[in-house]
Amino acid sequence: MSRVKLERRPLLGEPTGWSDAVPIILQRIYAARGVFGPEQAEHRLTRLLSPQQLGGMSEVVALLAQAIHDDASIIIAGDYDCDGATGTAVAVRGLRMLGARRVDYVVPNRFVHGYGLTPELVASLPTHAQLVVTVDNGIASLAGVAAAQARGIRVIVTDHHLPGERLPAADAIVNPNVHGDDFPSKSLAGVGVMFYVLLALRAHLRELGRFAANAEPDLSTLLDLVALGTVADLVPLDFNNRVLVEAGMKRIRSHRACAGITALIEASQRSVSTLCTSDLGYAVGPRLNAAGRLEDMRLGVESLLTDDPVQARRYAELLSSINQERRDLQAAMVAEAEAMVASAAGIDTQSVGVTLFEPSWHAGVVGLVASKLKERLHRPVIAFAPAGEDAPELLRGSARSISGFHIRDALAAVDARHPGLIERFGGHAMAAGLSLRAQDYSRFAAAFDAVAREWLNEEQLQAVLYTDGELPAGMFTLDMARMLRFAGPWGQAFPEPLFDNRFECFNWRQMGERHLRLSLRDPRDDALYDAVMFNAYDGQPPPTMLRAAYELTINDWQGRESPRLLLRHIEPA
């Protein structure tokens, strides 16, 4: 396992303009994340970037407006992850709000259709389809777009993934990451792009006089879905995304979320009133993702489209059951992967780009295995599983990366050096997917490791955990925990505050098989603090004197709240 190095997160500028009501510690936390004054922390919807700044938007809204006018059959082609499910729900709900009467959706089954708008998915479209709108996919679907157009179906691509060298010959494309697009924020999730399309379409329909007086649709009712998809997809929470997420969180906390999100929150035993972004990322989002990994994401989309609370609860119970199955399967696969690493002499020091394959693994869960091993080894990891009975000769891989190693570009480099080795690939800087022939696995593993060795140096292979320094004595309070909880929204590239202090381990006990419950004494004032650390017990007691990196959180037990330290890392002090 990689040794973790604790470092103080540097300030990116000096705090200025804050009122005395904002503690200095919070001002410094913000400044370490590029927020230097109150204006940069005011997440008002009026400060959203204009939809008209997105390239291709005028062509997209013109096609959609015409389709609504002609009462055309519109098919939303979504994706099988949380971003895709929420984006599909936003598209269906939003277009219906804006006057479209014939709107339906399809979501590919990863084991039948593959990823995106594939020719196989196009072949399954109903005969009456006239316009396909992709959500969270499509920018790499050259063959699928061509297949749709060959059937006389027009295609609009809305996506946020990085494009390849060629773009699909769609009738219109909107994607902030298309080369030459000047949209200031490249971090919109797929659901965010679709929401922006609806904003622009509403403005266009307004200009055409399509709305009766005081009857313009309120698209802000979709922001709970936008928040969930944005957080779950781990896109960077730049200012624009924080505006979207904060607005969605306010809708949820005020009990105005759609029935499906409310039911999923309740099924995950979280409080609607005090929900935070980590609850979306770790409890709600995985329940939706589980449907796409093991079953059919239509279950997830339907849960987000129903307005019947009873039906929503049924979907939430089913999704929770599938998620538990996913958790059990993931635990078994991760244990097998860790055993592989342990038995392969020196794999965590000799392989820089790590690849793993087990014939019994489930293709829908290998991404989670790659993520866990990436955290343990602090190396880019790709986990593979058989593609399925329909393609027994293929492997599907899911890649997760570390800072400084653009995983999609790395796959592109392998593809350029070894043409034909990879069947297909796509993704982001930190996550990607690919498929290749089973017989080529060993050759790919060597080629991927070679690129990783060239692109990564020893410093980058050192795991660093950045903290916000010491939390001063006397600040371990419930009020401080509450303030930090709601000072975000926290998420990718805008992380929750993480402190590090020196403590004495006054007492500890084991919880379950691998968790720790500790009582920590602060030597500065002899105060005792309750702490927990998950998946940390290895049979050895924690150090008597220790340095801990931790979050100050709220423990809600039987309606009583108290501050608690959630430990992320401990080492002898």
Image (cartoon, rainbow, N blue to C red):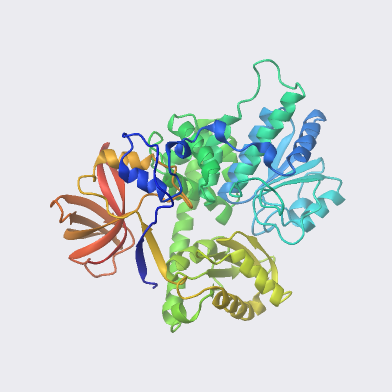
Quadrant of residue 338 within the rendered picture:
bottom left
The residue closer to the viewer here, 396 or 504, is: 504
Quadrant of residue 439 within the rendered picture:
bottom right
Task: Find the residue positioned furthest to the bottom.
Answer: 345
Residue 512 % position (x, y) = 28, 59
Image position of 330 (left or right of 209): left
Res 210 visible: yes
The residue closer to the viewer here, 137 or 160, is: 160
In the rendered view of the protein, which quadrant contains the N terminus? bottom left
Total tally of numbered discs in the picture? 0
What residue is shown at x 56% (from left), y 48% (from top)? 82
Establish if 161 lies above or below 55: below
Residue 360 % position (x, y) = 54, 70
The residue closer to the viewer here, 11 or 500, is: 11
Establish if 204 lies above or below 209: below
In the rendered view of the protein, which quadrant contains the C terminus? bottom left
Residue 96 % position (x, y) = 68, 30
Res 388 visible: no
Quadrant of residue 229 within the rendered picture:
top right
